[in-house]
Image (cartoon, rainbow, N blue to C red):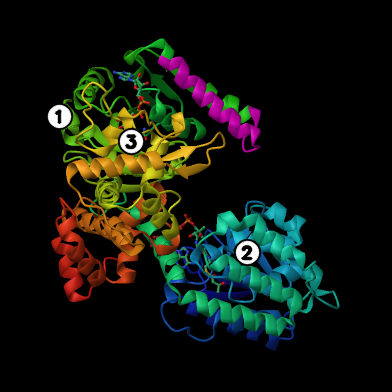
Amino acid sequence: MAVITTRREGDVLVVLSNNPPVNALSIDVRQGLVQAIGAADADAGIKAVVIRGEGRTFFAGADITEFDAPMREPGLPAVVDIIEACTKPVVAAIHGTALGGGLEVALACHYRVAVPSAKLGLPEVKLGILPGAGGTQRLPRVVGVEAALAMIVSGDPIAAGRAQAIGLVDRIVGETSLEADAIAFANEVAAKPEHPIASKATATADPGVFDRFRAQNARRLKGYEAPEACIQAVEAATTLPFEDGVAKERALFFKLVTGTQSQALRHIFFAERAASKIDDIPKDTPLIPIKTVGILGAGTMGGGIAMNFLSAGIPVTIVEREQAALDRGVAIIRKNYEATAQKGRMTPEQVEKATGLLTPTLSYADLADCDLVIEAVFELMAIKKEVFGKLDDIVKQGAILASNTSYLDIDEIAAATRRPESVIGLHFFSPANVMKLLEIVRGAKTAPSVLATCMALSKTIKKVAVVAGVCDGFIGNRMLTPRQREANALVMEGATPAQVDQVLLDFGFPMGPFQMSDLAGLDIGWDPATSNGAENFRDALCEAGLRGQKNGHGFYDYDEKRNRTPSAKVEQLIRDFAAKQGVAQREIDSQEILERLLYPMVNEGALILEEKMAQRASDIDIVWLNGYGWPAWTGGPMFWADTIGLDTVVAGLEKHAPRMAGHRLSTLLADKAAKGQRFTG
Ligand code: 3HC
Ligand code: NAI
């Protein structure tokens, strides 16, 4: 069936697009639109046109899958010009989302009507590009420069009501009567002598507005190329005639769309969607209804995990060993919600509703009826086993029993129960109420319905989930291990902690490994009773009283405002330690630091793939982007490795191998490098 069909309703031509799932503006759609507008122009009986999307949405944008090939004519810029030049008024009838090219089509229409639930936006910046079909020129002419800048540079959509308030939507119509209301609107406006044409309007702005915007958003936009291009394009709308502004927009668009940042961000778009698919689990696998959740342990993780479910309206029973820990945990949950309310992101009623769904208790028996229990107690196998044995006795059959363990063997934990098929790892990241990532650890015996339910649940609690196999540290922490090993080795060999951190900051990470240690506390897992200051330099630092940010002294010294300066004392302690160990110190340059920190991570990622501990390379990227602050514009570790060339990575690993204790080259990586292949795309 044709993707674009037309139908007469009296004097109005209704143009329907049916290109599931999101009505992307693929070549067939563009051709169909041009034909439909041609037909409307040619037929004197037609007084107006309504364009509408079938299914769940108006056009959600250009077809991103077409970006890698040369553009097929008619391109979207030509299509929108044809729509705008139609001799009959054209009305966009919007439901679902009018995004990107979809909103550009709507802007070329003379009028826009929308249902209350519709969302309108120009999200191109999130794909590393800018609106390339006149959006940067028409939007400021329709809604003004400040509103347009905010929409184009953030990429966030706005609701129909807000769109009406800024003049983007002419009328809000009935939620269930979009087509009829749009036709009625078209009949009303058909009688008017003239119709608004966005490209003919002018956009004016105080020239200072752009620099102010740059300054206000500098931190958020750091590292990305597209936002600056967006700002320049909108600026052009205020200084250049429409045609010249469009030409500038096109030039910027082409530069970005062929650049590595946009390729990386498009990779992420598809990687995020791929991550939710589990290869051997059919889509129709029955799900276990999750109406109530139990959490064991109200510590750092238990409290944060609980908040995810409370915020989603799911009641939580939280169990602790002793009253004081329970009270502390509950108080922190409340404090976090209140802080959110103070920032205006929750109403007091919402705070009450969420906290009202929480039942604190000291009794395991209260977990009996939970559909899902997540354990977040101390990271010790003996304790985990004891706890799972108890849960097995108490919790109803059919419920999911999950562990939030960071490193431990889920199969061994599952074996402590008589129902290993119900056991799974749900590895949240700290702070669990904020961090987007959820590693779902699939045990050898985990039932398909348990896995599918957890995957579906991750959407309910707004997490990005990735399936991992059972191995030490799963995907994320396993790859952190070689990076930390090399970071430590580098400072032993003569780099300073600040130098190592700086390399990762320059690469785009929010923090380096030593800043991370300072934040977590140098004494995590350190035992003064057994510490002898001889095994690793961290023992020596702990013995010297350094604890990190919490006592103001770690790899850096901190002032009351947490500003950091590299600690000369630490540098000396490490030098002394290296001398005692007989490790010679030398000058180390940034390139070596980068290669020794990141190439072993890529290698570990390849080992993870080789051992089938991740389903696909792009899943590894999703883990590092959402859980560890890997800079999005590089696409994640595996995409980044593809970008620089796997042969480059292997050559680097071979060069540094003599210094990298414990390094083992992945066969998969070596093979792919030899064959000139990639991990992704
Ligand atoms: N092109 C191609 N495929 C697209 C697409 C697009 N613009 N938008 C979505 N899809 C695909 C997805 O990959 C997914 O495929 P899959 O089922 O095979 O995994 C399927 O459509 C459904 O998408 P979602 O799972 O994301 O569905 P949701 O209902 O969760 O979300 C949405 C719907 C809000 C429309 C979301 O898909 C979205 O944000 N899409 C991208 C919107 C966008 O970025 N538009 C701008 C494109 S660039 C542009 O227009 C350039 C122009 O200025 C020239
Ligand atoms: P925590 O020490 O802050 O909290 C653990 C809580 O469990 C304490 O309040 C303790 O009283 C309680 N507890 C211990 N035994 C119990 C029992 N038998 N019954 C009920 N409650 C009991 O520890 P944290 O950091 O929350 O870690 C919990 C788990 O989450 C660990 O397995 C850890 O590896 C994992 N994890 C931790 C992350 C972090 O950044 N802190 C990140 C991801 C996972």
Amino acid type, residue under disc 1 in the picture: Ala
Confirm whether the magenta stretch covers residue 440.
Answer: no
For residue 320, above or below residue 511: above
Q: Are marks 3 and 1 in contact (CB under 8 Å)?
A: no
Q: Name the residue beneath numbered marker 2.
A: 152
Q: Is residue 355 visible?
A: yes
The label nearer to you, 2 versus 1, is 2
Q: Quadrant of the N terminus?
A: bottom left
> What residue is shown at x 68% (from left), y 63% (from top)?
149
Q: Circle 3 is placed at which residue position?
A: 288
Whether 179 is drawn above or below 352: the answer is below
Q: Can you give x and y, in whole percent of width and height, for residue 384 in the image?
A: 23, 25
Label 2 is placed on what type of residue?
Ile
> Is 544 left, or right, of 80 in this rendering?
left
Q: Is residue 287 visible?
A: no
Rendered location of residue 143, percent (x, y) = 75, 64
Q: Quadrant of the C terminus?
A: bottom left
Task: Classify residue 417 by image quadrant.
Answer: top left
Q: Which residues are magenta?
A: 325-348
Disc 2 on helix, strand or loop? Answer: helix
**Residue name at image x 50 percent, y 26 percent:** 333
Which numbered disc, 3 or 1, marks the residue closer to the eye? Answer: 1
* Residue designated by label 1: 415
Q: Earlier in the sequence, mark 3 or mark 1?
A: 3
For mark 3, does the 10 Å Cα neighbourhood hold few (<14), some (14 to 19), or many (20 or more) residues? some
Q: Name the residue nearer the viewer: 499 or 303.
A: 499
Amino acid at the residue labelled 3: Ile
